[in-house]
Image: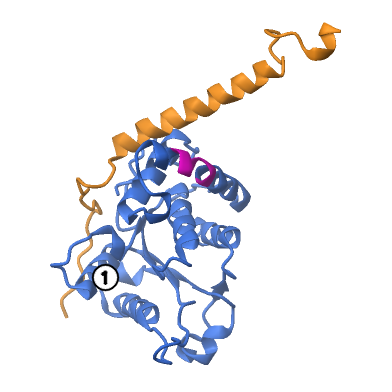
Chain colours: A orange, B blue
């Protein structure tokens, strides 16, 4: 019986699919946008002192 | 940990829409544990005979995840689908007759309930069949425990709970990512899915991951 071959595994990438580099860039963008949205929320709550909290205005 | 025979995991599971969340969880968990998933979906090549594709991948993987939960009677023909038990049999055959390297093969077998298989494939009675109850979190915990027994050297994998949290975080961010790159979240190809998982894991590394993502060859 012919012995099954064992070799390094490196399946070829298909050009029509998203590439690893494209995916990485897009994830970084998603993460940056989430961070910015989080910061904006914090600012809106007055958490960073940039905006006076409603109770302080009274 | 480079993607080699020892770190490659053959995924033998259903590819239907209902199973999709489990498949995505399996792919994520395998990568996040530092291994490389392989499956028949990775090459979209109509010129290749399916069974040759499957045997070729089995030959390149030391480990395997077999899910025989779809062995159930079809509404139209009143016959069960046997593709997954058949591929499990090829894997067992490779281990028995494939030579020295293939004798080291190891696998985990899942069914929806733990003892259901005894009614249709009693020859594997006595083996440890695990149940996933179609629960993504349970599946990730089980996979983590299986793969932790096959890590090279003294490598320690994080606990199942942490992997589950990471999977939920990946899944939460995925629709935003898909919108950004004009991909349909519900119709990702296997290749797209693996590239999205690999890139996410590379950006959220764990101590057991290879520093440059070398274990993620796909």
How many labels were placed on the picture? 1
Please report the residue visible at 48 percent of the width from the left and 25 percent of the height from the top. A32
Whether residue B30 is visible, yes or no, is yes
Q: Is residue B199 left or right of residue B113?
A: left
Please report the residue visible at 60 percent of the width from the left and 50 percent of the height from the top. B159
In the image, residue B47 sits, relative to residue A37, either above or below, namely: below
In the image, residue B120 sits, relative to residue B19, either above or below, namely: below
Please, which chain is the residue tagged with disc 1 on?
B
Residue B41 in picture, x, y percent from top left: 30, 62
Q: Specify the quadrant that holds the N terminus of chain A.
A: bottom left
Magenta range is B171-176
In the image, residue B151 sits, relative to residue B80, either above or below, namely: above
Q: Is residue A27 left or right of residue B44?
A: right
Instruction: Name, please, the residue furthest toward the right.
Output: A58
Whether residue B150 is visible, yes or no, is no
SS at mark 1?
helix
Q: Specify the principal SS of the magenta part.
A: helix
In the image, residue B78 sits, relative to residue B43, either above or below, namely: below
Nearer the observer, B120 or A54: A54
Question: Which of the 4 image quadrants contains residue B17?
Answer: bottom left
Q: Is residue B98 left or right of residue A27?
A: left
Q: Is residue A49 magenta?
A: no
Q: Specify the quadrant that holds the C terminus of chain A.
A: top right
Label 1 Cα crowd, 10 Å radius (few <14 / some 14-19 / many 20+): some
Nearer the observer, B102 or B108: B108
Please report the residue visible at 71 percent of the width from the left and 8 percent of the height from the top. A49
Q: Which residue is mark 1?
A: B54
Q: Is residue B175 magenta?
A: yes
Nearer the observer, B216 or A39: A39
Please report the residue visible at 33 percent of the width from the left and 55 percent of the height from the top. B189
Q: Is residue A36 left or right of residue B68?
A: right
Residue A4 in picture, x, y percent from top left: 21, 70
């Amino acid at each position: 019986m012919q012995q099954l071959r064992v070799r390094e595994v490196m399946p070829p990438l298909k050009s029509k699919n998203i590439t690893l580099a494209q995916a990485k860039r897009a994830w970084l963008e998603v993460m940056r946008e989430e961070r910015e949205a989080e910061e904006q929320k914090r600012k809106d709550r007055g958490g960073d002192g940039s905006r006076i909290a409603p109770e302080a205005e009274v | 940990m480079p993607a080699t025979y020892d770190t490659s995991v053959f995924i033998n599971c259903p590819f239907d829409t209902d199973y999709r969340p489990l498949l995505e969880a399996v792919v994520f968990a395998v990568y996040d544990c530092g291994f490389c998933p392989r499956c028949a979906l990775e090459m979209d090549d109509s010129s290749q005979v399916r069974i040759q594709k499957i045997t070729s991948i089995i030959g390149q993987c030391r480990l395997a995840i077999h899910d025989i939960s779809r062995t159930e009677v079809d509404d139209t023909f009143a016959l069960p689908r046997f593709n997954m038990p058949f591929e499990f049999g090829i894997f067992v055959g490779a281990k028995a007759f494939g030579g020295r390297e293939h004798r080291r093969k190891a696998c985990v077998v899942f069914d929806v309930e733990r003892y259901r298989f005894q009614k249709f494939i009693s020859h594997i009675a006595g083996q440890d069949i695990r149940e996933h109850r179609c629960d993504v979190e349970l599946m990730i915990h089980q996979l983590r425990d299986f793969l932790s027994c096959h890590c090279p050297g003294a490598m320690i994998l994080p606990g199942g709970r942490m992997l589950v949290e990471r999977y939920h975080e990946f899944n939460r961010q995925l629709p935003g990512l898909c919108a950004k790159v004009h991909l349909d979240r519900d119709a990702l190809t296997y290749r797209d899915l693996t590239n999205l998982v690999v890139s996410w894991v590379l950006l959220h590394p764990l101590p057991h991951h290879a520093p440059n993502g070398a274990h993620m060859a796909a």
